[in-house]
Amino acid sequence: MVKLTKSQTDRVKNYKCEVCLKDIPIEYYFTPGDSITCTGCGTEYVLRSKSPLELAMQTIDYTKMDYDGSY
């Protein structure tokens, strides 16, 4: 069995998706402001801080979408 050092275990942190409850791996190279997508449901998050780990769900601004006039 391989013993991991503290620096190796700190490389990946997990955040639980608020929609599908799947773990989202947060790699060491992500920086605050990066956009992260859940692989389970496609929900997009923005990394607010790494310590403590804080993500914010991105909201969709429907007022800026370009709609067709007729359906």
Image (cartoon, rainbow, N blue to C red):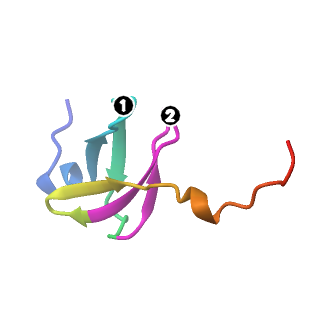
Q: Secondary structure at mark 1?
A: loop
Q: Nearer the viewer, residue 58 or 54?
A: 58
Percent position of residue 71, x then y: 85, 41
Q: Secondary structure at mark 2?
A: loop
Q: Amino acid at mark 1?
A: Lys
What is the magenta range?
Answer: 33-48
For mark 2, what is the residue? 41
Q: Are marks 1 and 2 in contact (CB under 8 Å)?
A: yes
Q: Residue at x 20, y 54 (%)?
A: 10
Q: Nearer the viewer, residue 20 or 3?
A: 20
Q: Residue at x 15, y 62 (%)?
A: 51
Q: Is residue 45 magenta?
A: yes
Q: CA distance from mark 1 to mark 2?
A: 9 Å
Q: Is residue 70 left or right of residue 15?
A: right
Percent position of residue 21, x then y: 33, 29
For mark 1, what is the residue? 22
